[in-house]
Image (spheres, rainbow, N blue to C red):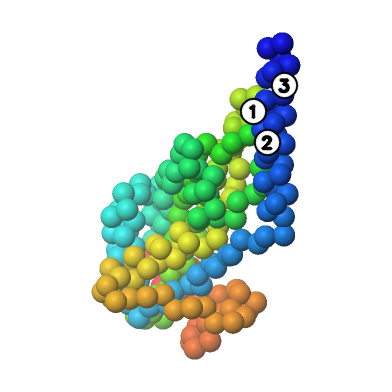
Amino acid sequence: MGVMKRLRSLLLVVGTFCFMVCSGLGQTQAVDIPPPLRIKIPFERSWQGMVETLQARQLPLVKQGQEEGEIQTDYHEYSSGPLTESHIAKVGVKPRLIEGDWVRVTYQFTVEMDLIKEGDTLVTVSAKIQALKREFLGAQKWVEIPSNGRLESELLSEFGKRMFGQLFTLAEPKKGFWEQAPGYIKDADVKPRIVGPARPPR
């Protein structure tokens, strides 16, 4: 009797979840990845401002390569416990979960800083998000979650306010921006390349 009762409970859980998944079919989740931020601030000062912004968030830095123009943080927990599933949807495109539960979600920032020309710096932020899935039988697996752009926008906004003041806001990306050639900047004299002060543009 105990086995049959557990089986009925499991079927009820699975059936309820399948209903929730099916009811969500056809719904799309908004994705708004911010474009690179071009600022008229020298590379060194921009670099230091981004490092300070990340440190203010208490994010450990695992890479600071000025020559490559790249800063990378360690993974940081965004949420865990019963609210994990709803929190995933705040920062990423949540995949459909056929069975099991989301128990934890973490993220990592990669910041690329490009020297466009003297006094002009291009800042690009990307977030790598992963969620820990626990299946009903106890097996656990990390699943990569596509970002919806919220984490990137928040970091760029905090960086901009640190550099320009509290009135700073991110500009909306122009229509068709992401269809342009990689690294395209309409009014740039030179196509952006990842270079640091130790390796100036030729």
- Is mark 1 in CB contact (under 8 Å) with mark 2? yes
Which residue is disc 2 drawn over? 99
Between label 3 and label 1, give the one nearer the viewer: 3
Q: Is residue 12 left or right of residue 78?
A: right
Q: Kindly identify the residue that appears in the image at 38 percent across and 54 percent down.
A: 64
129 is higher (above) or lower (below) than 45? above
What amino acid is at disc 2?
Glu
Work out whether mark 1 precedes mark 2 in sequence or the reverse, and give the earlier one.
2
Query: 144 left or right of 153?
Result: right
* Residue at numbered disc 3: 7
- Please say whether residue 181 is visible from this viewpoint: no
Residue at (64% x, 28% y) in the render: 136
Compared across the picture, whether 6 is left or right of 128 comes to right
User: Mark 3: which amino acid?
Assistant: Leu
Number of other residues with Cα within 10 Å of mark 3, as a class: few under 14, some 14 to 19, many 20 or more: few
Residue 101 placement: quadrant: top right
Kindly report the distance in space between the C-alpha atoms of the residues bearing marks 1 and 2. 7 Å
